[in-house]
Image (cartoon, helix red, strand yellow):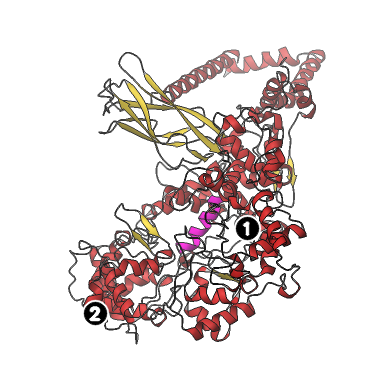
Amino acid sequence: MQSIRKYLSSAWQALFGDPVRAFGVVSLILLLALAIAPAKEHFSQWHSYQRRYLALIHDRGDAVSLRRRFVPGIHQIWLPELGVVDRCTTCHLGLNESSLADVGQQPFRKHPVVPHPLDTFGCVICHGGQGQASTVAEAHHSERAGEEPLLPTRYIESGCGQCHQNALPGTPQLDLGRTILTRYGCVHCHAITRPDGSKVVATDRPPSLAHIADKTTREWIFSWLKDPQAYAASTTMPNYKLSDGDASDISAYLMNSSVPQAGDTAAPNVKPAAAADLAAGPSLYGESFCASCHAVENAAGNLVGGDLGPELTRIGNKAKPEWITAWLENPRVYDSTTPMPHYRFTPPQIATLVAFLQAKSDSDYGSGVHLNPASSQQVAHGRKLIVELGCAACHEINGVQRPENFAPDLSTIGSKPLAQIVFLPGMDHSLPSYIVAKIRQPRAFGSSVKMPQFTLTAAQTDALATALLALTARARAMPDKLRVAAVPETNYQPAGHAGKLIAELACLSCHRFNGRGGDMAPDLSWEGSSVQRQWLTDFLHNPNTLRPSLIRRMPRFNLSDSDNKELTDYILAVYQSPAIDADIAPLVANSPDAVEHGRQLFYSKYACQSCHIVDTKADKGYIGPTLTQVGSRLTPAWVYAWLKDPQALRPGTTEPNQNLSDDDARALTAFLMAQKSPGGRGAKQ
Amino acid sequence: MIKGFIASMNYGAWMALALLSFATLAACKHSAPANAGLKATAEGAALVESSGGHQVGVTGTALKDPLVVQVNDDHGTALPGALVEFHGSAGVHFDPLAALTDSSGQATTSVTPGTIAGRYDLSAATPGKGKPVSLHIVETALGYQQQLGSILADKYCSRCHDPESSPERVSNYDNLEVKPHPFTEGAMLNKMSDADLTSIILHGGPALNRSALMPPYGNTLSTADIKALIAYARAVSDPPYQPSGTVYARK
């Protein structure tokens, strides 16, 4: 104590003993204090990066211009409208320098080409991280409250999705993720409101289970519930990891609650001779182009066919023959809104198809399942499980209400604070890794988690995470002028008797009309301007092949003559393009000279034969439709308008707009219109 | 007081020393061989690529197919139990970084290219008898612009320019009298400038005195689309494209 006091007093004496000495010491302290700020800046991280940048560009040939554009100090992109204060460019100095594209040393490389300039959008909108920070650790890796680490590059497309609700050509992963979000039915349980206020709507159609007992057996339901993918690898139904007892109880409730539907079963009218004809089934299945919508696993284990309808690999294990019979007679009896067309099959055809589909079964599937009749407690337990697991969020089930807000709302999942997340041990502490883990193994986050296990590949999971990460709080605060809305499906419905026919044939499952319908087949909104009456009538009777290489094609519907006329009349009268007027089509008479001139243009100047075939012997082009009989199919007004601007008639079509002069377009139209079908009226001319 | 100061200095120095040694330890741990725990039971004589090379993927995203290499012995037969290590430039991620060959002599890894678009020169190595055997592998990662180009090429160009057919899509290449150049054909395309390529896409083959079978896309594709297509063609070019920008004399 004594010695400390002695030290202190001698130190005081040494420093402030007399006024001159005190003045000197105080001045020194002041000088040092003033030096703190510049020293801090000199030794700051960003300053050392700026020195390294100068060293990097020093040896380059364009050093003078690079150095002229270099501004020392903290840089900042400030965009108050977007809430962006980004200082990233303080260290990332070469982002706009095109000559630094070859620099491997970060943070100096040029930013890759993206559609938006960095100065108007900043960095964090796409990359995440803390824009205001001026150290690497804080800007890139901070996990403090309200802060987020940088977004890994593989989710970068989520940045685009904050403003763009529409599909973009350059964001395949985001588009895939959004498709999965609606197709796997995520939004049946999780409500998602887009930043622009619209709701995400599911596009899958989980079947109603109100009449399930007419369709299948309790044993099949049990096996299905235990492992949906074992029945059909492509199904979107998730695995709920149910115990045998639970699956048995749920199947008991579903069978018990099912009420018969009049007409959804019919005695199979199988004539033994028809059923025995083994070749008839596959050929009718092929001719009817069932594979356009339904997939079947082939011997090599690959799925072949479309995904609009359910996979049929083991349909014989599931559906009762009497149900398939009634379904093929008219699917709308069982399900009034099914996308399956009413094919108008004849009874022998139905018998053939039923036998063919019944044979699509796997004798091992469900062979070990023997369920005892369920007690009333077990049925009640089944109902309890159905309520708990939220089965009715997707499926219509008698006696169970559709739950509202069953699962957490995901409208701002992309901004979920890290502090609210309970990470699993060993997990990377970031939002993307949490979302991916939650999709991959939801039940790992606790036994009370009800979310089932979906069957998604790693790429699909990443895509889904990308779509979810786009749902940020920032996106909701964006100015309206930056928002690009998704193109919503219209509620177009064809009217009258023809409208009824179009609904029965489910034309909208594949074709698009006036902004509504599928994308498997051409948009028919303007079909009436495009085709000739005789061709359309013939085509509806027997859809011949415009593009024989296509696997998915228009089936034949066995239409009656009166139905055919009704449809033809309706299509020709209603689906007219306002841009095409057949009466004032600027066409010359198809004089032989014009046709010959058109031929020369076709083969030499425009070389159309690289994609189209007119002469089956000489031409080989395989990309566009065959034009051998185009003069009997299309109207001259349509051909002319198409040649002038294909994208105006069908946006996104691959035929390039060749900027034809009116004369060239007229001559080519004359040549094409001279390509008549052999039986057509124009053949002799 | 001074004594105390010295003591604290000492303390600081000790701290610094301790930190340094920790850092060294950590670094050692980091650079520890990736094959820890893998015990090779055989040493190969040759390393060959089975599949998964020459893929075109997207930056920062795992390539679609795994990389599979095979270790052979002196007689060219597959060798199980050999150790294979994968190496790549900074940013490339292998999962796993090292593997033992399976019963068919193959080692498999998943490759995730870094965040920079371009060609990635990777290698696989196995400790051989005497000296290590290594194999050179090339993968390509596309950035935003190149990926947009690949999507556009798929829609507008590949039906003719890509000779490969798939069951879903038959190539038109063989049907054309004058054969188009595949985008990978660096020997041909590397000689053409960006301006030439832009011109042929805008105005069609005749613009450069080439075949009219190549139609003009100037009214169909945007400038950004065409730039993207060229960026894609440059990215997949084999041999690789060397941009011939302004050449500055180095100081």
In the image, taking residue A664 as reference, residue A258 lies left or right, namely left
* B196 lies above or below A177: above
User: Does residue A239 appear to the left or right of A47 in the view shown?
Assistant: left
Q: Which residues are magenta?
A: A171-185
* Badge 2 element: loop
| Residue A562 percent across, percent down from the top left | 50, 86
Q: Quadrant of residue A75?
A: top right
The disc placed on residue A271 is: 2
Residue A429's tag is none
Membership of B63 in magenta stretch: no
Q: Position of residue B99 (x, y in %)?
A: 34, 30
**Main secondary structure type of the part rendered in magenta:** helix
Q: Residue A589 appears at what percent x and percent y?
A: 73, 68
Subunit ID for the residue under disc 1: A
Q: Chain of mark 2?
A: A
Location of the C terminus of chain B by quadrant is: top right
Q: Is residue A561 left or right of residue A238?
A: right
> Tag 1: residue type?
Gly
Residue on which disc 1 sits = A652
- The local secondary structure at tag 1 comes to loop
Q: Quadrant of residue A486?
A: bottom right
Does the CB distance between marks 1 and 2 fall below 8 Å?
Answer: no
Residue A408 shows in the view: no
In the picture, the quarter occupied by the N terminus of chain B is top right
**Nearer to the camera, A257 or A376:** A257
From the viewer's side, name the closer residue of A539 and A129. A539
- For image coordinates 64% across by 51% down, the residue present is A603
Residue B44 visible to the viewer = yes
Q: Is tag 1's residue or tag 2's residue first in the polypeptide sequence? A: 2
Work out how far the residue at label 1 is from the one at label 2, CA to CA, in angstroms: 49 Å
The answer to whether residue B60 is above or below residue A38 is below
Which is closer to the viewer, label 1 or label 2? Answer: 2
